[in-house]
Amino acid sequence: MRTVILRRSLVALFAAAVSFGAIVQAQAAETLRIGYQKYGTLVLLKAKGSLEKRLAEQGVQVQWTEFPGGPQLLEGLNVGSIDFGVTGETPPVFAQAAGADLLYVAYEPPAPTSEAILVPKDSPIKSVQELKGKKVVLNKGSNVHYLLVRALEDAGLKYTDVQTVFLPPADARAAFERGSVDAWVIWDPYQAAAEKQLQARTLRDGTGIADNHQFYLATRPYVENHPEVIKALVEEVRAVGEWSKANPEDVTAQVAPLLGLPADITLTSVKRQGYGALFLTPEVVAAQQKIADSFYQLKLIPKPLNIKSVIWTPPAAVAKAP
């Protein structure tokens, strides 16, 4: 009887040791947690699987989490549920103003035609100047917020000359279709869908007034502790972006089902997107500072910001082109 009990005790101890070893091994393994949205280069990178293969050589696993929009993704970064993500140029400004400890690590080339101020096909409005006193719907804090500011400024109007209505894209489209607003400031693929399905007219896109960069951001601790992982990640994003630029039809076939949109609408969006991630340049930093300054002057954020202070400067070995 004692022998049976002893054997059972040894088995239990062995099982406990194995479990403890597995826990220690799991804790020792590095995990890169990436936030993405349904549209953009990260979706293609996730599908390709090349990042997982490359980082496996460094002992790093990859975990993906989908977010409905840029502000939500940045909140995920701020609370530490993800390490890295991508969003438009305006959400990071609001996040920094709110005290988020994030760093810009890379950006995509300009895509000024991938956002626009739209009006209904039969609208009498023919210019931005004619928006004075009109209702304009947009997603607060998104990339198009700055487009509206710049378009009004360029037309000789003040931000307060229009009645802003803040709604997320789906609700904004509904308001636009009902005619309860006069204009809609929106980005792709919603923009392309409105153009194709509603015959919405473009009053003004970002050409000449807003670059509409996409920015890759990460938590400060992760960037500072894992510069080589960030380098590999940016290189893989750049590679899939260059492939996307050369193969828009293949990208469309992959992305359209995810968006639930027809191929022609998706292809329009794909062709207007910027591709080829790079580390930030002084010119891009200056453009982002201009956005922050504009929002502070309009009292859309509570304090002035120093964008340069939240730009990651990669070590020389990391910054060197592959």
Image: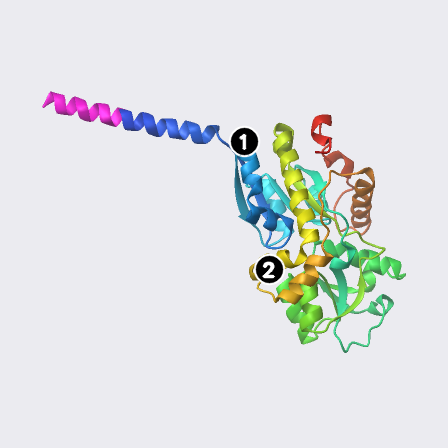
* Picture residue at 75% right of the left edge, 75% below the top: 121
Main secondary-structure element of the magenta-colored stretch: helix
In what element is the residue under mark 2?
A: helix
Q: Is residue 139 visible?
A: no
Q: Quadrant of residue 234?
A: top right
Q: Check residue 7 for magenta coloring.
A: yes
Q: Is residue 1 visible?
A: yes
* Picture residue at 79% right of the left edge, 51% below the top: 211
In what element is the residue under mark 1?
A: loop
Q: Amino acid at mark 1?
A: Glu
Q: Quadrant of residue 267?
A: bottom right
Mark 2 or mark 1: name the one nearer the start of the chain: 1
Give the quarter of the figure containing the C terminus: top right
Relative horizontal placement of residue 178, taking residue 49 as reference (left or right)? right
* Above or below 13: residue 158: below
Give the residues drawn in magenta, as a range.
1-13
**Dot 2: few (<14), some (14–19), or many (≥20) neighbours within 10 Å?**
some
Residue 315 in picture, x, y percent from top left: 71, 27
Q: Which mark is residue 57?
A: 1
Q: Which mark is residue 253?
A: 2
Residue 81 in picture, x, y percent from top left: 54, 41
Residue 15 in picture, x, y percent from top left: 29, 28
Q: Amino acid at mark 2?
A: Ala
Pick the front one: 308 or 298: 308
The reply to whether callout 2 and callout 1 are in contact (CB within 8 Å) is: no
* Above or below 141: residue 167: below
* Picture residue at 86% right of the left edge, 57% below the top: 153
* Above or below 275: residue 99: above
Residue 275 in picture, x, y percent from top left: 71, 49
